[in-house]
Image (cartoon, helix red, strand yellow):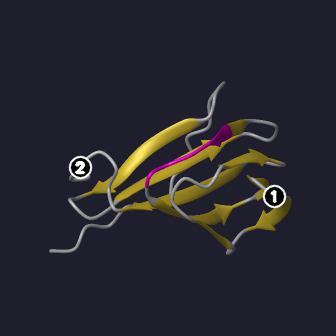
Amino acid sequence: MAEIKVLEEKFGEKPISELVYEDANARVIRFYLKGGQEIKPHTSPSSVFITVLKGRLIFISEKEEAEVSQGSTVFYKPEELHGFRALEDSVVEATITPNPALRRI
């Protein structure tokens, strides 16, 4: 049967991350950020697709910063620098594929 993961709001003193789903192909993580909190720029060996479920954020890449809001999706290629800063209380969902934790060498 399909799994249902209801959107909750789990804000804290630091950004909160929650593993929503994981299999051999992908990892899905939700991030809960209060306004002003950020996920510092970093890279991943996988493609990363980030969807804003609630709020407004500044997304950071190697070349630019862009403001995005609820309903927007940002796509990053493998090894591309990425991060984001919440302009208000926000929830984002990252789909990372292939799953870097289970990636075969």
Give the residue furthest to the left. 1
How many other residues sit within 10 Å of disc 1, few (<14), some (14-19) or many (≥20)?
few
**In the figure, is residue 95 to the left or right of 39?**
left
The residue shown at (84%, 62%) is: 66
Q: Earlier in the sequence, mark 2 or mark 1?
A: 1
How many other residues sit within 10 Å of disc 2, few (<14), some (14-19) or many (≥20)?
few
Is 97 above or below relative to 33?
below
The residue shown at (60%, 57%) is: 92
In this orientation, does residue 6 appear?
no
Which residue range is magenta in the image? 40-45
Tell me, yes or no, whether the highlighted magenta stretch contains residue 44. Answer: yes
Taking depth in this image into account, of 42 and 79 the one nearest to the observer is: 79
Marking on residue 102: 2
**In the figure, is residue 85 to the left or right of 18?**
right
Q: How far apart are the two marked residues, 2 and 1, measured between alpha carbons?
A: 29 Å
Give the residue furthest to the top. 13
- Residue topped by disc 1: 63
The residue shown at (67%, 75%) is: 71
**In the figure, is residue 27 to the left or right of 86?**
left
